[in-house]
């Protein structure tokens, strides 16, 4: 079994070939399924990292405060300005 970090690295490499639309759909599937645990977190982090590497702005769902990073667990859509927009659940 892979460690979460190994899984994350594997996913980031594979997600490089996914389109932005495919990554947005993966994110939305993940946040609607509440049963994976640490593998789900590694998977979603890889999805979001891949979106960021493709130039997608994550600032509407990611915040930094007092050294902590918070990522909203919400479905998203891609806005016209290449920004992920959180959707109401």
Image (tube, grey):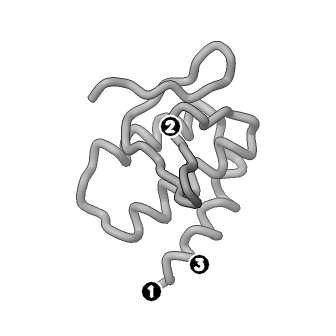
Which residue is label 3 attached to?
Answer: 6
Residue 52 in the image, given as x and y percentages of width and height: 69, 43
Location of mark 1 (residue): 1
Query: Foreground residue, 20 or 72?
Result: 72
Residue that lies at the very extreme toward the top in this rendered image = 80
Task: Give the percent coordinates (x, y) of residue 38.
Answer: 38, 70
Q: Residue at x 45, y 30 (%)?
A: 76
> Which callout, 1 or 2, points to the residue nearer the camera?
2
Q: Is residue 56 above or below residue 2?
A: above
Please tell me whether mark 3 or mark 2 is closer to you in this view: 2
Q: Position of residue 56 (x, y in %)?
A: 68, 33
- Around disc 3, counting alpha carbons within 10 Å, would you say few (fewer than 14), some (14 to 19), or many (20 or more)? few
Q: Earlier in the sequence, mark 3 or mark 1?
A: 1
SS at circle 2: loop
Say whether disc 1 or disc 2 marks the residue closer to the N-terminus. 1
From the top left corner, tell me how far across and down residue 89 is, in percent: 27, 29
Q: What quarter of the picture does the N terminus occupy?
A: bottom left
Q: Is residue 11 left or right of residue 26?
A: right
Image quadrant where residue 12 sits = bottom right
Residue at 64% across / 52% down in the picture? Answer: 49
Instruction: Give the residue number, with chain letter if any, for mark 2.
Output: 61
């Amino acid at each position: 079994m892979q460690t979460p970090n190994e899984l994350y690295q594997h996913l980031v490499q594979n997600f490089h070939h996914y389109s932005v639309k495919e990554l947005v759909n993966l994110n939305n599937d993940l946040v609607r399924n509440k049963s994976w645990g640490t593998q789900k977190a590694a998977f979603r982090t890889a999805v979001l990292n891949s979106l960021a590497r493709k130039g997608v702005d994550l600032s509407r769902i990611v915040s930094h405060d007092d050294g902590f990073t918070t990522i909203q667990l919400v479905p998203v859509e891609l806005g016209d300005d290449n920004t992920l927009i959180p959707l109401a659940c």
